[in-house]
Image (spheres, rainbow, N blue to C red):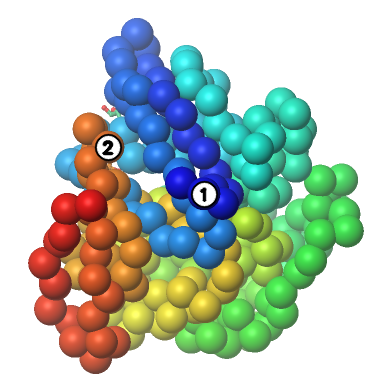
């Protein structure tokens, strides 16, 4: 693929001696959306964690604009290829405090930022959520706030692990709109069958890594479209 932002070549991942991902290869371009689908337990979260270099990989090569995590430096890699987890993060303090702390990381110095209050608004949240204790936020609020902080730090690639799983339908649509407009490439694990058709992009189906293209539906149409083999 010309102009690949992220290149994943022959990725291998094992857990407790059991091979989960074997020889997975794909590429992602700037601003592109790649959904990851597959049965529960097939290895979708492990794939995202590997792409963020949060876990060791047993084989294969990852490059971002031609550089491996070691060449770029792992903290800088993670500032550019950012994992947004599926479950509520057990953070202490408030989201504002976490956002301030994140900006102090060396790997974040000099990087661009987005307007966090504007993102919070666009995600359908009240501005006050940024100054509430994490422990006081509902699951759906916390899920969107975590996403907002990641968006504000402007990674090149967002690794989204079921980031709308705790949300009602209206909130899901708001999140999809914000993510589609954010400019980052999205690698997006979802169990929501209609989400790829609403957002558009490619779909990578695990465990084999089969790729399909999804035609984007008009935004008001919630019916899934047919998949076209690439
Ligand atoms: N830390 C771990 N120790 C042992 N096994 C693990 C660990 N993390 C994941 N696994 C196993 O690896 C496999 C893949 O897990 P993963 O969380 O990537 O699945 P998934 O496709 O994201 O599932 P789901 O759709 O249910 O979230 C599962 O069989 C899981 O039990």
Q: Position of residue 162 (x, y in %)?
A: 36, 56
Viewer-proximal residue among 24 and 133: 24
Q: Residues within 10 Å of mark 1 (few under 14, many from 20)?
A: few
Viewer-proximal residue among 1 and 74: 1
Q: Residue at x 60, y 80 (%)?
A: 119
Q: Is residue 165 visible to the viewer in this orientation of the structure?
A: yes
Q: Position of residue 150 (x, y in %)?
A: 62, 61
Q: Position of residue 62 (x, y in %)?
A: 55, 31
Viewer-proximal residue among 103 and 128: 103
Q: Residues within 10 Å of mark 2 (few under 14, many from 20)?
A: some
Q: Residue at x 23, y 52 (%)?
A: 230
Give the number of the mark in front: 2 or 1: 1
Residue 209 numbered mark, or none: 2
Residue 127 numbered mark, or none: none
Residue at numbered disc 1: 2
Q: Residue at x 42, y 61 (%)?
A: 33
Q: Secondary structure at mark 2?
A: loop
Q: Is residue 46 above or below residue 104?
A: above
Q: Residue at x 28, y 80 (%)?
A: 169
Q: CA distance from mark 2 to mark 1?
A: 20 Å
Q: Secondary structure at mark 1?
A: loop
Q: Residue at the top extreme?
A: 17
Q: Which image quarter: residue 203?
A: bottom left
């Amino acid at each position: 693929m010309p102009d690949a932002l992220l290149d994943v070549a022959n990725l291998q991942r094992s857990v407790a001696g059991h091979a989960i991902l074997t020889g997975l290869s794909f590429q992602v371009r700037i601003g592109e959306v790649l959904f990851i689908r597959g049965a529960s337990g097939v290895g979708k979260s492990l794939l995202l964690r590997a792409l963020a270099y949060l876990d060791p990989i047993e084989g294969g090569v990852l490059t971002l604009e031609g550089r491996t995590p070691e060449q770029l430096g792992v903290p800088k890699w993670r500032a550019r290829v950012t994992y947004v987890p599926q479950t509520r993060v057990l953070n202490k303090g408030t989201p504002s405090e976490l956002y301030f702390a994140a900006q102090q990381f060396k790997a974040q110095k000099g990087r661009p930022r987005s307007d966090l209050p504007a993102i919070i608004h666009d995600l359908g949240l009240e501005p006050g959520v940024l100054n509430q204790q994490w422990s006081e936020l509902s699951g759906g609020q916390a899920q969107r706030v975590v996403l907002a902080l990641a968006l504000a730090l402007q990674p090149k690639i967002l690794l989204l692990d079921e980031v709308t799983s705790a949300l009602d339908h209206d909130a899901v649509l708001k999140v999809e709109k914000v993510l589609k407009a954010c400019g980052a490439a999205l690698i997006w694990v979802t169990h929501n069958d209609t989400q790829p058709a609403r957002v558009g992009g490619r779909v990578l189906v695990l465990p084999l890594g089969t790729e399909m293209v999804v035609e984007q539906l008009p935004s008001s149409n919630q019916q899934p479209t047919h998949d076209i083999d690439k």
